[in-house]
Amino acid sequence: MGIIKRLGLDFKWIKRLFRKKKARIGIYGPPNAGKTTLANRIVRDWTGDAMGSVSHIPHETRRARRREGVTIECNGSSVTLDIIDTPGLATKIDFHDFMAFGLTEEESKRRAKEATEGVIEAVKWLDDLDGVILVMDATEDPYTQVNVTVIGNMEARKLPLLIAANKIDLPTSSPARIHSAFPQHPLVPISALEGQNIDALYQQIAQHFG
Ligand SMILES: Nc1nc2c(ncn2[C@@H]2O[C@H](COP(=O)(O)OP(=O)(O)OP(=O)(O)O)[C@@H](O)[C@H]2O)c(=O)[nH]1
Ligand SMILES: [Mg+2]
């Protein structure tokens, strides 16, 4: 009996030794920040696949999308992620805004309805995550109701949070402005579109979510 017990313990120990680190990571942020562009880049870099469609029209992503088993290797440490690209979070969704992009009234109303459902879905996903990459457009003012609310919510849930200050390829971008707004969280300036500094992001992902 004693031997079996000891063997059992040994199996557990061996299992733990070989178990891969796994984390469910949600990519969050306001519409148009570049969440899907980043999700596509991560998934392409580490698996060769793509994830979702990108558009200059806000609320392109209106259903959360998950890609499982994306293994990121950095400086000898490896972490396997389930990447969830979420719909953009917004406090106000008005179909007129979509008509200004040239969509018909019918298309705009449908997009507004789906976008609203998408916000609710994105918030629900928070219950099921191990960490969050919060993508912000570094050319924009970071002190928005959405950013403040999302960060407060993640802090309350004690979810590890990594801020990706995106679009640093644009001359008006200011990651420093985001850092001074939310100095309590790690921040990586990136261009999801052009790939600038993306290796630094992978290092931070491996460090914070591994
Ligand atoms: N210049 C620049 N543009 C970017 C960058 N990342 C994304 N974009 C552009 O920003 C727009 C929105 O990108 P998406 O990836 O669709 O943004 P999103 O956050 O997924 O948006 P929703 O799904 O609508 O919430 C597109 O026109 C992208 O090409 C970047 O690093 N630099
Ligand atoms: Mg998207």
Image: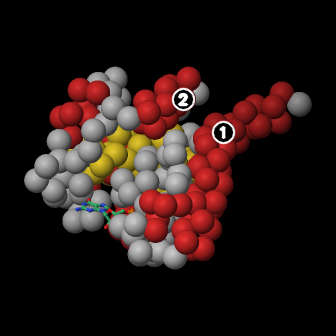
Q: Amino acid at mark 1?
A: Asp
Query: Residue visible at 58% across and 27% down?
Result: 157
Query: Residue visible at 29% across and 27% down?
Result: 181
Residue, disc 1: 127
Q: Nearer the viewer, mark 1 or mark 2?
A: 2
- In the rendered image, residue 128, in percent from the top left (x then y), is placed at 65, 43
- In the rendered image, residue 79, in percent from the top left (x then y), is placed at 46, 50
- In the rendered image, residue 203, in percent from the top left (x then y), is placed at 30, 46
Taking the image as shown, residue 152 lies to the left or right of residue 175, namely right
Colouring scheme, one of rainbow, by chain, secondary structure, one colour: secondary structure
In-front residue for pair 163/123:
123
| SS for dot 1 | helix
In-front residue for pair 101/199:
101
Is residue 52 at least partly visible in the picture?
A: yes
Q: Earlier in the sequence, mark 1 or mark 2?
A: 1
CB under 8 Å between discs 1 and 2: no
Residue, disc 2: 153
Q: How many marks?
A: 2
Label 1 CA crowd tier, 10 Å (few <14, some 14–19, many 20+) = few
Query: Residue visible at 27% across and 38% down?
Result: 141
